[in-house]
Image (cartoon, rainbow, N blue to C red):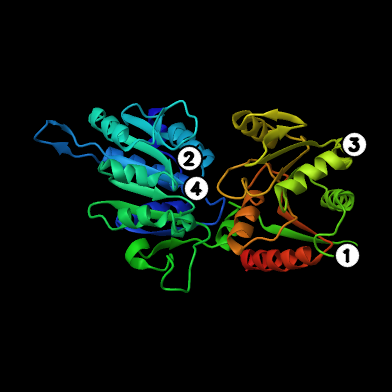
Amino acid sequence: MEGEVFMMKLRPHQERIVNKMSTTPKGQVIVPTGGGKTMCMIKDAQREFNSCSWDVFVKRPERKTVVVVSPRILLAQQHCDEFEEFLGLHPMLQRKILHVHSGDTSYESTTNPDEISEWNSKQYRFNKLIFTTYHSLHRIQESGIKVDSIYFDEAHNSVQRHFYPATEFYAGLDNIRCYFFTATPKYNKSIDVPSMDNEEVYGEEIERISPRELIDSGYILPPKLLVKDLEMTEAGRTPVSKESTHLIETIDESNVDKILICARRTAQIVNLLDETDFTKELASRGYSWMYITSKTGAYINGKKVDREEFFEVLNTWGKEDGKRFVVLHHSILSEGINVPGLEAALFMRNMNHIAISQTIGRVIRTGDSNKKFGLVAIPVYDRVGISTAKKVTAMVETILA
């Protein structure tokens, strides 16, 4: 088992990224969703922990602190699990873990800067891994602890007004390794608005991996587009019963087992489930159903569950051959969260190009050997659907270019 970490097999594009990170202290890594950017972080962190030099003054190895920044608490927890899955195979990589966010975790956790500083002082014998969110990163900054390497995941979030100051702070430090990972870099034309083309903060692009390279190599699947033209109505005036019918027709034509539905708003999901025969129609076709939003929480087949159970079931169903299910959400599953097995994304709402790209990325990950493409479906029955279809079509064409 010990050798498995050092023999951790990287794909060719991951090797290029990790090798360039070893010689470049700051920069952007542009990788399509499904391209394995987390593995690049893990491999780089492993190398950093293994490279600790001997401190002659205290007569012990000089330990390193690595910070991983995520857009959501759920993704921070997922990152921690993935890091531990691989780094945990090697007993010599002694490390301590801290979570700096407001979510529940089995590891030590705090958002208090004084407690972060105290924890850091107590762990001087160990390498340290800190998992945080953009929302809480400033707490680590306020703690004053030394950070050796920091990985910004879904880095397009870093340009947001509330998140940018802490991002700029760490990017501007000397003697820190700083990397920005995203499939969808965020650029702004105004000089007064943060933008990822600001090389002083974000550095140059270390590597940009094209979707076509990953498709041709078999690491992600090509998206397949289904634009379902339906009876037109005025935007906002489609009866919820009609929306249910449109959805079922699109699901029938999709002819896949595991479907992600991107709803226009939380109320649309609630109305579909409470005021129509949508769930009965799903059940008659052998589908289970689940949904999650920030407003309502999580439900599985009508039963309210906590988030941990929701994602456990979602992952189990995703890996289960022949399991048919539909998962509805407004935005919480669009970015970062790895849901295995999804075969189709059904767009009911308009999005910006970043959200569209991230959502398509949920379904073009490779699954079982029978999965040949990721289906991208849009039911078109009003002006919103027409606009959404145009944007999604353009994004699919870009991916396939």
Depth check: give the residue in front, 226 or 219: 226
The amino acid marked with disc number 3 is Ser
Marks 2/4: CA–CA distance: 8 Å
Marks 3/4: CA–CA distance: 37 Å
Marks 1/3: CA–CA distance: 27 Å
Marks 4/1: CA–CA distance: 37 Å
Q: Residue tagged by mark 1?
A: 232
Marks 3/2: CA–CA distance: 37 Å
Q: Which numbered disc, 2 or 4, marks the residue that appears first in the sequence?
A: 4
Q: Residue tagged by mark 4?
A: 71
Badge 2 density bin: few <14, some 14–19, many ≥20, Cα 10 Å: many
Compared to residue 212, the image places residue 167 above or below, namely above
Residue at the image point whose x is 73% and y is 58% from the top: 224
Compared to residue 255, the image places residue 280 above or below, namely above
Q: Secondary structure at mark 3?
A: helix
Q: Residue tagged by mark 3?
A: 284
The amino acid marked with disc number 2 is Ala
Residue at the image point whose x is 65% and y is 41% from the top: 295
Q: Secondary structure at mark 1?
A: loop
The amino acid marked with disc number 4 is Pro
Asked if disc 1 and disc 3 are in contact, CB closer than 8 Å, the reply is: no
Asked if disc 3 and disc 4 are in contact, CB closer than 8 Å, the reply is: no
Q: Residue tagged by mark 2?
A: 76
Q: Secondary structure at mark 2?
A: helix
In the figure, is residue 230 to the left or right of 364?
right
Find residue 288 and report its horizontal and vertical position in percent.
Answer: 79, 34
Depth check: give the residue in front, 345 or 2: 345
**Which quadrant would the N terminus be assigned to in this image?**
top left
Find residue 189 and report its horizontal and vertical position in percent.
Answer: 47, 74
